[in-house]
Amino acid sequence: MGYLKFNKFDGSVDLLPAENIMHVSAPGAGDGDIGIKYGITAESAATPTFLTAVVAGTADGSGDAALTAASRDAINAAIEAANGTNDAVSVNLGSGLFCKSITIGDTDPS
């Protein structure tokens, strides 16, 4: 199984599995976060919904920075590159952009 490797400002990384991804959202209008929706249901209080990993961006490691359409394209390209591998494929979110955090839940930011 391949992985998506998101570089953080401090040199550490966050990994997400590149399997079973159904959709990568456009950056959210409010905060520029991107949702990666998996074909796995997450049990919520009311009804089951699909599990979503929300990727938030940063430029300096502490503040927020909006991800871009190019960030989404890079995530999609990394998914394709990781297909059928056992490697962690780096996602280049854009010049000066890093992964601030990844939150797992059932809410899409778009």
Image (cartoon, rainbow, N blue to C red):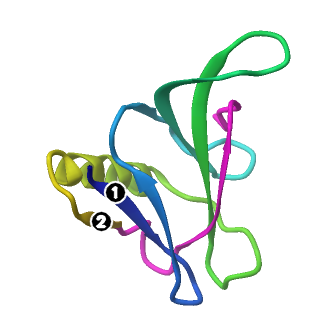
- The one nearer the camera, 26 or 12, is 12
| Residue span colored magenta | 91-110
Q: Quadrant of residue 45?
A: top right
Q: Quadrant of residue 86?
A: bottom left
Is residue 34 magenta-colored? no
Q: Which residue is mark 1?
A: 3
For the point 37% across and 58% down, the residue is 4
Considering only vertical position in the picture, is 98 above or below 55?
below
Name the mark on residue 100: none
| Residues tagged 1 and 2 counted as in contact (Cβ below 8 A) | yes
Considering only vertical position in the picture, is 30 above or below 87?
above
For the point 28% across and 64% down, the residue is 89
Tell me where residue 99 appears, x and y as whole percent.
Answer: 56, 69
Identity, as a three-letter code, of the amino acid under mark 2: Ala
Tell me where residue 37 appears, x and y as whole percent.
Answer: 51, 33
Tell me where residue 46 appears, x and y as whole percent.
Answer: 83, 11
Q: Quadrant of the C terminus?
A: top right
Q: Quadrant of residue 61?
A: bottom right
Q: Secondary structure at mark 2?
A: strand
Identity, as a three-letter code, of the amino acid under mark 1: Tyr
Tell me where residue 55 appears, x and y as whole percent.
Answer: 59, 54
For the point 42% across and 70% down, the residue is 94
Give the CA separation, mark 1 to mark 2. Answer: 4 Å
Q: Secondary structure at mark 1?
A: strand
**29 horizontally vs 73: left or right:** right
